Image (cartoon, rainbow, N blue to C red):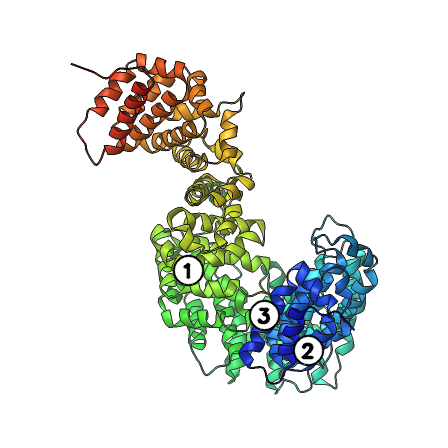
Amino acid sequence: TFSTDSRVQNMFDILFSDESDKEKQEKAANNLIVLAREDAGAERIFQNNGVPLLVQLIDTGKPEMILAAIRTLSGMCTGHRARVLGISKLCSIMAVDNEEIVLATANLFQCVYDSLSGGDKRNYGKEEALVLDSSKDLKDILLALLEMIASKKVSGHGRDQALNLLTKNVPRKDKKNTDNSKGLFTIDHGLKKILKVCGQVPDLPDQLPLTENTQLIASVLLNKLYDDMRCDPERDHFRDTCDEYIKSKFDPNDMDRNIHAINTLSGILQGPFDVGNVLAGRQGVMEMMVALCGSEREVDQLVAVEALIHASTKTSKASFFISNGVTLLKDMYKKTKNEKIKIRALVGLCKLGSAGGDDYSMRQFAEGSTEKLAKQCRKWLCNPTLDVRTRKWAVEGLAYLTNDADVKDDFVEDEAALRAMFELAKSKDKTILYAVACTLVNCTNSYDKKEIIPEMVQLAKFSKQHVPEQHPKDKKDFIERRVKRLLKAGVTSALAVMVKADNSILTDQTKEMLARVFLALAEDIKDRGTIVAQGGGRALLPLALEGTDKGKIKASHALAKIAAVSNPEIAFPAERIYEVVRPLVSLLNTERDGLENFEALLGLTNLAALNDKLRVKILKEKALPEIENYMFEEHDQIRQAATECMCNLVCCKEVQDRYLEDGNDKLKLLVLLCGEDDVQLQRAAAGALAMLTAAQKKLAVKITKVTGQWLEIIQRLCIHDNPEIQHRGLVTVFNMLDADEQLAKKLIECELLEILTYVAKLEDNPKKQDAINAARACLSRAMDTGLIKPFSN
C-alpha cells in the first residue's frame, strides 16, 4: 500500500466520484495542476501513486478529465519522471480529434523531450543520475512522431502538432553546432512521410485527416530540414529522395496518383523552393500540368493551377513559366465558368504580373488591367457565398497586385474589402497570414527602400541603364492617408490575432513583416493611443523578442514609440511591462540610428519613472553604460533624453555608487550640463544632481572638486527664471549645506547668501512656492549650524 497524502488523495477521490458536481471537479483538477507545477507538489503526487491514477483519469474518456490529467503530467514531467508515461500512450492521446487536448498533449511531449534532451535547464540533484542515456528514448520519440504524420488514425490537429514538434526539435537551433544527425535521421526515416502529407488532396476520397494548416506546416518542416543540411551530398540526397517520390507517383492510367505527385511538388515549392524549382523543370512535369489543366475534373484543374502559381515565384526563375504559364493561365481564366478555378488562374496572372515590384516603369500588364484584376479580387474577397479557401486566394492575388500604388490606394478606400480581409486573418485557417502580411506591408510602404542618389540616376540615364521610378501615389502624404484608413478599419486587432498564431506557420519572415506594419502604423503620435486601445502594445512584445534581427528591431522601435508617449501601465498591463525593457535597451546599441536611440531613451525614461522594480530591471539589462554614453552625445535631443532617463535612475544605489567612484567624469558632466542653455536639459541634470546629493553626502562635497565652475553654475540655477530648475538648484544647495561644515561655510561666505535671502523674502506665490520654501530651509539650516545669526533690532 502507498502512504497517501490526504490532500492529493482527496482531489483524486473528487475527480473519480460520479456524485461530485462539475464545479467541485473543476476545482480539484485545477488544484492538481497548480500543485504539479511546484517541485514539492509534483513529488507528492508522484509518490502517492499519482501517475497510474492520472492515466486512469485519461482512460475515462471525458475531455475535461483528460485535459486536467495531461496538464498535471506536464507540470510533473521533469527529470526521472519523464519516462513514466509510455510514448505510444502519448501518441494515442495526441491523435484524438479535440484541439485543446491535442495542444495540451503536445506541450507534455515537449516537456518530456526537454527533460530527456537537456533542454530543461533546472537542477534536479540526485535524479539526474537516473536519466543518463536518453538518446534511444529521443530517437523513439522522433520515430513515433514520424509514424503519426502518415497515419490515418491521427486527427488533423494531432498531425499538425506532430509536425510542429518535429519542426521545433529536429533542426539545429544554432548553425555553429555541427551536429545535424537529428535532421539526417528524420530525412532517412520520415522524408517520404512528410511528402505524403504535402501530396494529400482533401477533395479526393480516402485521404489523411487534415486541418486547413497541415500542408503548409509540412512545407515549413521540409524547408527547415533542407536548411539543416550541411553539405552538397546531403542536399543532393534530400533532392533525390523527393525526385524519386514524385516519379514513383506518376501513372498515365491513374489521375489521382498524378495529382498527388503534382500536389507534393506544390508542397516542396512552398518549402525548399530551390529543390521544387529543379523538380518542376524535370521532363514530363510541365506536360503533366498542361494535361491536368485541360482535364474535365475540377480537382485536377485546381491542383495544376495551384502548382503553377507556386512555381512562378521569382522573376529570374519565372521566365520559363512566363512564356508557357501565362498562355495556360489566360486560357483557363477566360474559358472556365468555375469561380474556384477562375480565381486561382487570376492569382497566377497577378503573381507573374507583379514581377517588377513597385517599380512604376516595369509594369508587366497594360495600363489599367492591374486595377481590373484587383477589382475582381476585391469582389471575390467580399463574397460570403464563396468558401474560405477560395477567398484566401483573393488575398493572395492582392498581395501581388498591391505592389502597384493605384491598386493599394483603391483597396484601402474599400472598407468592406479591408474588413473582409481582417476577418479572414482572424479565422482558423492560418495559411493566409503571409498573404495578409504582404498586402499590409505594400499598403503601408513599410518595405526597405533603396536610397536613390540623384547623381547615380543621371549617370544611369546617360549610360541608358534602367532607372526605377516612384509612383506618384507612393509619396508620403498618400502613405499617411492609407495608414489612417487601415487603422479606422481595425487593422490593429487583426494584427493582434495574427501574432497569436502559435505554430510553425507564423515564420520569422512573416513576423518581420508584421513588425514593419506596426512601425508604419505607429509613425504618427496621434494614432498610438488607438493602437494601444486595440491591443497593439501586447501584440508587439512577441515580435520584439523572437524572429529575424531586422524584425526584432522594427518591433522594438514600434514599442519605443508607444512607450515614449503613452502610460506604460495601460499599454503593457501587469507583468508585461517588464518584458518591454529588453527590446528598448537593444535600441541603445550605437549601430542603431539616432531616432531609434532617441525614442528608446524616451520610453525607458517613462518606465524608470514608475517603480524601483523597473529601474532595477533596466540596470540588469546593462543599459546604464549606454545611457551615460548618450549623455555625451552632440545631438541635443538625444543628450536631453539620456539625461532625463538618468534623472529617473539616480535613486538606485547602483547608479549612485557609479557617481561615487573616482577616476571618471560622470559627476563633472552632470554639473556642466546644469550650465547649458537648453532648459529641458538643465531641468533633467539639475534634478539628477539634487537627488544624488540628497542620497549621498559625499557627492555634495565631490561637486566642488570636479570643476572650477561649480559655484557659478549652482548660483545660476538658484536664480533661474524657470521655477522647477530654481527649486532643484536650491535643493542641491540645501544638501551641500547639510553635508559638510567647511563646505557650508564656503557657500554662506559668497554671494549665494544674498541669492538665498532674496528668494526667501519673496511673497508666497503658488508658482514659485517650492523654490521659496527651499531657500527658507537653506537659511534656517545655516542658522541651526550657527553660520548666520537671526537679524535683531
Label 1 sits on a secondary structure element that is: helix
Q: Which residue is mark 1?
A: 405
Judge whether 334 appears above or below 497 on screen.
below
Numbered disc in front, either 3 or 1: 3
Judge whether 608 appears above or below 552 on screen.
above
CA–CA distance between discs 3 and 1? 54 Å
| Residue 251 falls in image quadrant | bottom right
Task: Give coordinates of residue 318: x percent, y percent.
Answer: 61, 63
Task: Give coordinates of residue 105: x percent, y percent.
Answer: 67, 71
CA–CA distance between discs 2 and 3? 15 Å
Crowd rating for badge 1 (residues with CA inside 10 Å; few <14, some 14–19, many 20+): many
Q: Nearer the viewer, residue 84 or 515?
A: 84
Q: Which residue is mark 2?
A: 58
Determine whether label 2 and label 1 are within 8 Å by CB.
no
Which amino acid type is marked by label 3?
Answer: Asn
Which amino acid type is marked by label 1?
Answer: Ala
Which amino acid type is marked by label 2?
Answer: Ile
Crowd rating for badge 2 (residues with CA inside 10 Å; few <14, some 14–19, many 20+): some
| Residue 46 falls in image quadrant | bottom right
Q: Earlier in the sequence, mark 3 or mark 1?
A: 3
Label 2 sits on a secondary structure element that is: helix
Q: Which residue is mark 3?
A: 30
- Quadrant containing the C terminus is top left
The residue drawn where x is 49% and y is 23% is 665
The residue drawn where x is 55% and y is 60% is 510
